Amino acid sequence: MPSPKKGSPSHGKGATSTDNPVQFAAAVYPHKKGKRRGLARFVESLKKSRVRVAGILQEKVSIDSGMSRVDAIDITTGQRIPINRPTRENWKNRTCSLDVSALAETTAILRRAIENRVDLIVVEKFGDEEREGKGLTNEIFQGIAAGIPLLIAVPDTNLDIWNDRSGGIGAVLPCEENAFHEWWISIQGATVGSVRHDSRLGRIMAP
């Protein structure tokens, strides 16, 4: 798939901004190289504007001897949950160091966002677990099915599987703050809950 045009939302198969009321988007970034700070700036901007935004961001935190861990950050409370804490052996062998029990805490953050009917859910995670239909997958698609606008960061290596799972009907954006603001403005007139009636979403809850 060609890269989205800078600063301009693109939509799924055959959709346009007028015939696609589905309110979710993938913020696509280069795997292991892409900078995603624009997502955090976008979230802070919305919070200052009193938009009820919830979900999780991620941040790498340096630990000893050049290693780093990954924290999930609750957008609502600021709570940090270390979800990837490598041991020396993990770091040396580049093996998975995902803390599955900590990941369960992040699913609770998304469930609360859905229950509270927030204005926007932001998820900075669609990694190996989600690629396999695990991790945050259920909560991500439950939020979409509930008709709550959702913005998710997706590495370019996982974009095909994301499009397959979501029916290929959401927007695809460059991972840039301006693109997020343009998308957010563009969906303000969309009908909340319209996702439930879109036949193209037949596979959305069956990863």
Image (spheres, rainbow, N blue to C red):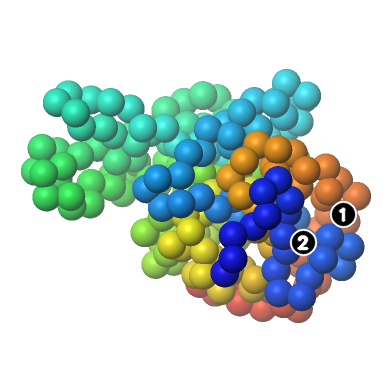
Give me the residue at 69% from left, 62% from top.
170
Q: Position of residue 119 (x, y in %)?
A: 75, 40
Q: Nearer the viewer, residue 121 or 10?
A: 10
> Which label is found at residue 190?
1
Amino acid type indicated by mark 2? Val
Secondary structure under the numbered disc 2 in the rendered image:
loop
Q: How many marks?
A: 2
Q: Which residue is mark 2?
A: 22
- The amino acid marked with disc number 1 is Ala
Q: Nearer the viewer, residue 138 or 90?
A: 90
Q: Position of residue 177 (x, y in %)?
A: 65, 36
Residue at position x 47%, y 32% in the image: 73
Left or right, residue 22 beside residue 126: right
Kindly indicate whether the residue at mark 1 contacts the one at mark 2 (C-beta within 8 angstroms): yes
Which corner quadrant of the image does residue 13 belong to?
bottom right
| Residue 6 at least partly seen | yes
- Neighbor class of circle 2 (other Cα within 10 Å; few <14, some 14-19, many 20+) is many
